Image (tube, rainbow, N blue to C red):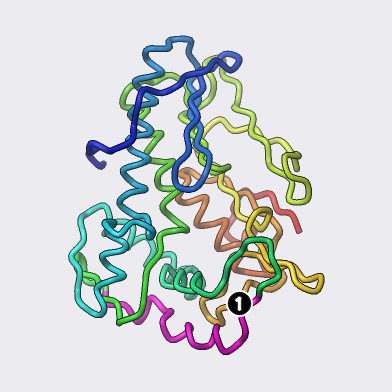
Amino acid sequence: MTAMAPVENVVAPAIQRSGRDTLFLFHAMATSCELRIETDDTALSERVAVAVEAETRRIEQKFSRYRPDSIISKINAAAGSAISVDTETAMLLDFAAQCYALSDGLFDITSGVLRHIWRFDGSDRIPDKAEVAAILPLIGWRKAIWQRPFLTLQAGMEIDFGGLAKEYAVDRALAVAAQITKLPALVNFGGDLCVSGPRSDGTRWKVAIESVERAGAMEGMLELSQGALATSGDARRFLLKDGVRYGHILSPKNGWPIENALRSVTVAAATCVEAGMTATMAILQGKHAERFLKREAVQAWCVR
């Protein structure tokens, strides 16, 4: 779908053996990234690894809000001017608009501006109500003007693909790997993952679900033969004050963490983007998360 472009900082990969797989590990998009291919062909694995890392870094550079040269930074700095975007960015904006409509405004890529006052670092620093109230006028996809290929945000508004970019990178990385080899492969970026199909003997990939209580411990084990899994929860990003735990997923309607939210939800779907979007939507439902997942007929594993 998208042509790869040369990307800086991609060097010869360090391939490891892991059982019947070759394993390539790298760090991108603020998380640990893993590529597994069921083969002992090191040369082939290196070719795939180089391509996967290059594609991942291309997406990171293009959609990171932390890079001044990214399309996201260009949009956010436009201060009310219309910005023309390319086809790939337009596709993600269309998807975000659909998510906004389907979630009754809860999945909102303009709510990332709240990061200026919320820091989910495990501390007890909670912003006061006045700070939150001052940000709210800058939130609301309905305030944006999206007429493909032009996007116009009101001055002070921002968009953030934080809820989409990593999952999109997983799907793209697997697609790039599939262009090179049809061998069974798994791409896992920080627990959000996708597989090319079952293993060569027909068995499923085994995937651990991390415990929300004990770092490094397992909540359970899933088996996956096709599609993707994505997890959303507060295991790593939270605040804790006076015995109350505040998860990192915020309501765009009031600017505060979702009340009665699931501690963790893992969703299975055809693509990682779809799985990640659904997992986030479930968290946004608060106490009604399980009802939402059942209504949508979604395969999911929830922890409260």
Which residue: 22% across, 71% down? 147
Q: Locate the C terminus and report the quarter of the image it occupies.
A: bottom right
Instruction: State the image coordinates of residue 261 (x, y, percent, origin top left).
Output: 69, 66
Magenta-tinted stretch: 126-145
Q: Is residue 165 left or right of residue 261?
A: left
**Picture quadrant of residue 264:** bottom right
Instruction: Tell me what residue is drawn at x 38 percent, y 75 percent.
Output: 141
| Residue 48 in view here | yes
Q: What SS does tag 1 mark?
A: loop
| Amino acid type of the residue that numbered disc 1 sits on in the rendered structure | Trp
| Residue at x 57% of width, y 89% of height | 130
Q: Quadrant of the N terminus?
A: top left
**Residue 157 in the image: above or below residue 5:** below
Residue 136 belongs to the span the image colors magenta: yes
Residue occupied by mark 1: 256
Q: Main secondary structure of the magenta part?
A: helix
Circle 1 packing at 10 Å, graded few (<14), some (14-19), many (20+), is many
- 88 and 68: which is toward the camera: 68
